[in-house]
Amino acid sequence: MRFFDCNTYVGLPMNPPPGQPARPGVSAQELLAAMDRAGIEKALVWHVAQRDYDPLAGNELLAEAIAGHDRLAGCWTLLPPQCRELGDLDEWLARAAAAGVRAFRAFGQENRYLLRGEALGDVLSRLAAGRRPLILSVGKEWQALYDLLGEFPELTVILADLDCWGTDRYFRPLIERYPNVCVEISGYILDGGIEAFVGDYGAGRMLFGSGFPAAYHGGMMLALAHAEISEQDKQAIAAGNLDRLLGEVGP
């Protein structure tokens, strides 16, 4: 199978994820070497400085890190435009596209803002209009996510880092109501979960992600390879769905 990882980062975290050992930072070159070892063709990447240090500085660090690497596409992180940090939004989005950015992330709690239309409305309207995916590490923010999608039902959202204890009761209502919501599988460690999701909704709304370097590449690669679904559905989840989503991104 071809694999296109939608959830991986570069840089050195300020603190290791809860319950996980401290690990060294990963450069773009080290990420590519790990991808080669695992057999992953491409990755959609963010920089940990976007969350842990400064969002705009992290965006620039990401642009520098992935420059010249055709196998790496980038994610920039959002800020509310009211503080004038982003400047002209159309120019900011054009700079993002020129830097190889194909999707966006939002770290509201860490960057001190709310995931609401009052704060992000102008930015999210442009993302929705251009079918630019927004990747959200949900954590405990389900209520905020429900509110956000109620305001922006056309937004393309990828739910990332799902809890391994099973979050279907949280995300399935969103899958059924909002046609542009997808889930990535790096944390979806549920016996029969992939098969049940594909059986109920088809394979087109599920994406492969590893969570590397906080997690290992091979775990969910193995789970997907041995899932009791068709080879066509496996390939869609492994790479095809993300290829399609990014191919739909407009100007």
Image (tube, helix red, strand yellow):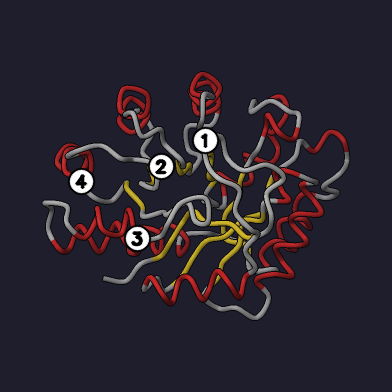
Closer mark to the observer between disc 4 and disc 3? 3
Is disc 1 surrounded by few (<14), some (14 to 19) or many (20+) residues within 10 Å? Answer: few
The percent coordinates of residue 40 (x first, y second) are 40, 70
Is disc 4 surrounded by few (<14), some (14 to 19) or many (20+) residues within 10 Å? Answer: few
Tag of residue 218: 3
Q: Quadrant of the N terminus?
A: bottom left
Q: Is residue 87 above or below residue 244?
A: above
Residue at horizontal 32 percent and vertical 46 percent from the top: 205
The percent coordinates of residue 82 (x first, y second) are 84, 33
What is the C-alpha distance between the residues marked 3 and 1? 20 Å
Mark 4 or mark 2: which comes first in sequence?
A: 2
| Amino acid identity at mark 4 | Gly
Residue sitting at the far front: 21
Secondary element at tag 2: loop
Is disc 2 surrounded by few (<14), some (14 to 19) or many (20+) residues within 10 Å? Answer: some
Tag of residue 19: 1
| Amino acid identity at mark 3 | Gly
- Residue 68: which quarter of the image? bottom right
Mark 4 and 2 residues: CB-CB less than 8 Å, in contact? no
What is the C-alpha distance between the residues marked 1 and 4? 33 Å
